[in-house]
Amino acid sequence: AVSRDLDWGIPVPLKDAEGKVLYVWFDAPIGYISNTKELLPNDWEKWWKDE
């Protein structure tokens, strides 16, 4: 999830999301994928691509 009921974070600017905050940056998964590709150059796609 990108939002949670937390006391810290960036408030979600939507009426239906009162009390919700953003706590994960959208670019974080790119880092996970690129690190996997660096570690497993021949097998990274097995983890990240759906068959």
Image (tube, helix red, strand yellow):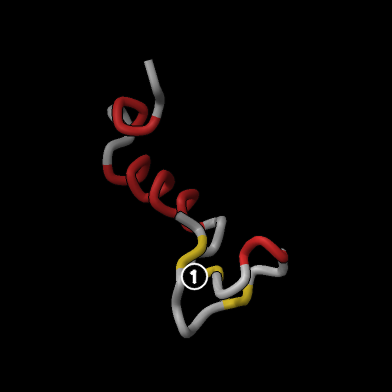
Q: Residue at x 62, y 71 (%)?
A: 18
Relative height, residue 24 to residue 44 (above, below)? below
Q: Residue at x 56, y 75 (%)?
A: 19
Give whichever of 46, 22 is nearer the camera.
22
Image quarter in which the N terminus is found: bottom left
Give whichever of 25, 36 is nearer the camera.
25
Answer few, some or many: residues within 10 Å of disc 1's Cα (few below 14, many 20 plus, some between 14 and 19): some
For this view, does 47 lie left or right of residue 30?
Answer: left
In the rendered image, which residue does mark 1 sit on?
A: 23
**Percent position (x, y) of residue 24?**
49, 65
**Percent position (x, y) of residue 38?**
35, 45
Q: Secondary structure at mark 1?
A: loop
For this view, does 36 lie left or right of residue 33?
Answer: left
Relative height, residue 24 to residue 50 (above, below)? below
**Percent position (x, y) of residue 9?**
53, 79
Taking the view exactly as shown, the residue that stands out farthest to the bottom is 7
Give whichever of 51, 38 is nearer the camera.
51
- Give the total of numbered labels: 1
Image quarter in which the C terminus is found: top left
When asked about the image quadrant of residue 41, the answer is top left
Taking the view exactly as shown, the residue that stands out farthest to the top is 51
Q: Residue at x 64, y 69 (%)?
A: 12
For this view, does 3 lie left or right of residue 43?
Answer: right
**Three-letter residue code for mark 1:** Tyr
